[in-house]
Image (spheres, helix red, strand yellow):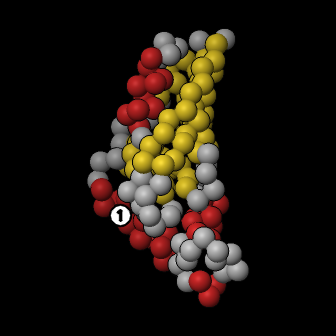
Amino acid sequence: MRQAVTTLTTRTRGQGLSEVTEPVARWVAAQGMESGLLTVFCRHTSASLVIQENADPDVRSDLERFFKRLVPEDPALYDHTLEGPDDMPAHIRSALTTVQLSIPVLEGRMALGTWQGIYLFEHRTRPHERTLALHLLGE
C-alpha cells in the first residue's frame, strides 16, 4: 500500500462552479497507482466541492440559482456580516454541500461516471484563490 499527497490551487471567477476534474485526474495518473481511494479536501469554509454533470452547463447554472434562492444574501438575516453580505450565506452554502469527496481509483483512473466532473463551488461573490488537498491511498 502506498500513499501520495499534494495540494492543488485554483483561482475562481467568483460565485459559481469551477471544474477541477482535469488537474486532479492528471495528478492521479502521475502517481501510477492502479487502485485506491482518492480524497479531495477543500481547505476553506466559504467554498465547497461537488460532483456534478459536466455535459450540460444548464445543470450548473440551475444549481447556482437554486442555492442563491435557498440561502439569500440578505444582511438582515445574519449576525455575522463583518466580511460582507455574501460571507455568511457562503458559509451556509458550504455547510449544505461538502468540503470533502472520496473517489475510488480503478485501473489507474478516478471511477467517475460518464457525465461526472469534480467542481469547486465558490460561494463568495468576488474571485478567490482556493486550495485543495489531494490524498491518494492505493497500490
Tell me the residue at 64%/60% (across/down). 95
Tell me the residue at 60%/41% (across/down). 41
Residue 108 location in percent, x, y? 46, 18
Q: Which amino acid does label 1 sit on?
A: Ser
Residue 104 location in percent, x, y? 55, 29
Q: Which residue is nearer to you in this view: 80 or 18?
A: 80
Instruction: Give neighbour class at mark 1: few <14, some 14-19, many 20+ (Cα, 10 Å).
Output: few
Q: Which residue is nearer to you in this view: 18 or 114?
A: 18
Tell me the residue at 29%/53% (across/down). 56
Q: Is residue 124 left or right of residue 3?
A: left
Image quarter where the N terminus lies is top right
Image height of 28 relative to 21, above or below: above
Residue 64 location in percent, x, y? 42, 65
Tell me the residue at 45%/32% (across/down). 24
The quarter of the displayed image where residue 71 is located? bottom right
Q: Which residue is nearer to you in this view: 54 or 25?
A: 25
Q: Is residue 42 left or right of residue 31?
A: right
Q: Is residue 36 visible?
A: yes
Judged from this view, the residue extending furthest toward the front is: 82
Image height of 102 relative to 50, above or below: above
